[in-house]
Image: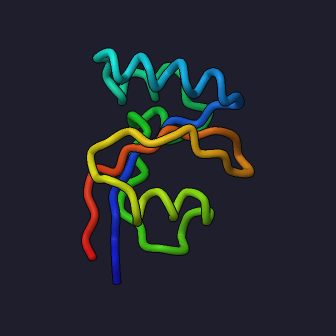
Amino acid sequence: MAKANARHILVSSEEECNNLKQQIIDGADFAEIAAANSQCPSGKQGGDLGSFSPGQMVPEFDTVVFNETVGDVHGPVKTQFGYHLIEITSRDS
């Protein structure tokens, strides 16, 4: 079964999500941005969600993690929790 490792940043608005994404594109450290801004408890670990399989996250999250490019920052991704930036750190098929 496929497994992936990812980290994310969760915020309440698409605008804030886009602003944080631009900071990361401009060279800011993903983990530092997550620690300072993420509304998810994982922010304390730099947004790290560890290893998970399809179906363990909400569908919108899974779609990105199991289909998009590893190593890139994806988002904003809207879920019932808010807006996410997602970085897929590794994926096994």
Between residue 69 and residue 30, name the one nearer to us: 69
Q: Is residue 22 left or right of residue 3?
A: right
Give me the residue at 53% from left, 18% from top: 19
> Farthest bottom residue?
1
Circle count: 0
Quadrant location of residue 41?
top right
Q: How is the image coloured?
A: rainbow
Give me the residue at 46% from left, 32% from top: 44
> Farthest front residue?
68
Between residue 16 and residue 41, name the one nearer to us: 16
Can you say whether 58 is above or below 33 in the image?
below
Give me the residue at 27% from left, 76% from top: 93
> Farthest right residue?
80
Give me the residue at 33% from left, 15% from top: 26
Percent coordinates x, y for residue 39 in the rendering: 62, 32
Can you say whether 21 is above or below 2 in the image?
above
Percent coordinates x, y for residue 84 in the rendering: 56, 40
Can you say whether 35 is above or below 64 in the image?
above
Quadrant location of residue 47?
top left
Q: Is residue 50 left or right of residue 34?
A: left
Q: Say which quadrant the N terminus sits in.
A: bottom left
Percent coordinates x, y for residue 11 in the rendering: 63, 31
Quadrant location of residue 61?
bottom right
